[in-house]
Amino acid sequence: GHYGSMRSLGSVGRIDSLARKSGGRNKTIVRLRGDRKLNLKPGDDEERIVTINVGGRVYMTCIRTLLKLPGTLLYEMAQEGGELYTDSAVFIDRDNRCFDYILQYYRSGELDMPPAATFSEKLWTDELKFWKIDDPAMKLPTASEVDALQRELGKPATNGLRRKLWLLWEDPQSSTMAKFLLGLSVFLSVGAVCTFVLETQPSIRTLEVGYHFLGLSAVQIQDALAMFEMVVIVFFSIELVTRFIATSKKLTFLRTPLNWMDALTVLPFYLNYMLDPSNNNNNGTVVDILRLARLSRILGLALKLGKYSTGVRVLGRTMKTCISELGVLGVLLIMAVIIISSAIYYCESTYDIYYNGGDEAPSKFESISRSMYFSMISVTTIGYGDLTPRTSCGEFVACLAGLSGIFVLGLPISIIGVKFEERYSEMTNQLKVQRERERLLGLQKKLQALKGMSVVVTKILGRRPSDPRNLTIADREMIQQKAVSVFHEVDLDNSGEIDIQELGAAMKKLGMDLDSDVLAVMMQVIDTDGSNSIDATEFTEFVFNFSTGEIWDQSENIVIGQRTEFTQ
């Protein structure tokens, strides 16, 4: 295809004096009379060059380019009888910045999303919807793709107990029990952290006599906390061991950092049990090890709790993709700390040289290593104020430390922030796809539950037919009369068409109260011309199909088709 810069409308074609709207299309689309001189091969329709004016910017491409993506708006226009096929030119009042990427999609077959700084996600989504292009970020993977991905993560290839256990602990969407275990794991993680905090309260730790809380003494509270901690450890131990047994890739399991966090949650407890200080005569080394073990346990619990947070997972992915930026940040920070600490040490050392034994205390900048503490908190713009320079030279260096922090940290952190937004956007899209997958699975279950019901045909005929798929001529005439009657009852504006809300009202009159998701699928089945409304003929045919049960097969096929679209 060919791409043209901004040109006058006169060189492309003139708008019809009546500004004819294309049949049934949005008012933002206006048909133009194309310039036939641009047609390279008048006899070859697919090689004809057509002109698309989007928001004042003119684009030129071949018919064959637009026929690459069936089902899209430009594909419909480029087909025989469409606006571009007939007139060779069209004006569309939409954002031409988005259209740059959309036309490139027709040419290359790959749809790139514009930079987030230029377009909002809502604007891009609205444009894709207008052009009838499916958002690749929202395409649902097939069941085989999901299975292949799960196998890479360690799901056993064959059905059996190990596979059921793997799905139970690794895929919360696989069953209600899996969701319950996920919720229980989050609850126990939060409870374990709270328990660890409460254990350090002086009244509970020292078993203060006379202390009561909610009617419980310090001893009773400590026993309750110990019991809860035991429950937590048993649950997480079972989880860790079961997941290790169930996975088919045990080496990968052992190399995964998230599994180290899970181990860090339970192993310190067993270490604490084996090295009970009461059995080791309060050996100082043992006590230090136990303190480290308890610190490791709270660290493991905090990390495990973070595993369930979307923000924490995004931060982890961001850090993984920002290794080079973090390296630059570290080098710059070390350089700044060394230079500032050395400079302020020598500046403040002059204070001690001229110190004459008065009431003033000597400088606290006694060495470069001691000055590094001041340098670090100054460069990072924290500044506790516990160390302060006393010389003019030292104060000048302290000012430089604060200013250097802006330059040292500003640029790398801004880059990391941009990558965090990118990763967060990816994670958000994944969550949207997951929720859409759950919605479609639920919708499919609803359709399967409704399948075989004969409420409508029974209400119309006053009896349940022996075989709804083989109705008599009299039965069909009665169904047709009832369908037409109900259609006119709900068509309050007498437009000859009803929308999805009126369809819901019509189904209630026929004895079926359907929710919005099911109605939306039904509308896709009935609305064959894509006008978002149905006429009396379409409604009558729909009632026939509903009565015979054929509608359920068609609806379920639509849902299955949506579920099995490939991620591009």
Image (cartoon, grey):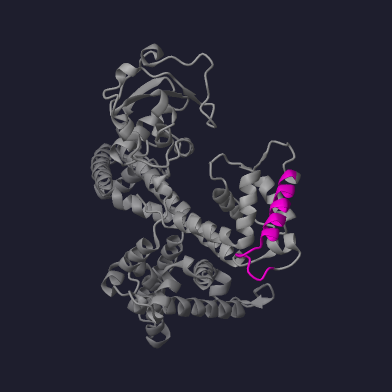
Q: Position of residue 131 (x, y in %)?
A: 44, 36
Dominant SS of magenta comes to helix
| Observer-nearest of 148 and 107 | 107
Q: Is residue 315 left or right of residue 510?
A: left
What residue lies at 73% left-to-right and 62% top-to-bottom? 461
Q: Does the segment drawn in magenta span residue 172?
A: no
Residue 63 seen in this snapshot: yes
What residue lies at 37% left-to-right and 67% top-to-bottom? 261
| Observer-nearest of 402 and 267 | 267
Residue 387 seen in this snapshot: no
Q: Is residue 482 left or right of residue 217?
A: right
Q: Quadrant of residue 211?
A: bottom right
- Magenta range: 465-488
Q: Position of residue 431 (x, y in %)?
A: 46, 54
Q: Position of residue 524 (x, y in %)?
A: 55, 49
Q: Is residue 266 above or below residue 116?
A: below
Q: Is residue 560 above or below residue 428?
A: below
Q: Is residue 144 left or right of residue 25?
A: left
Considering every residue shown, the one lying at the far front of the view is 473
| Observer-nearest of 88 and 267 | 88
Q: Position of residue 346 (x, y in %)?
A: 24, 39
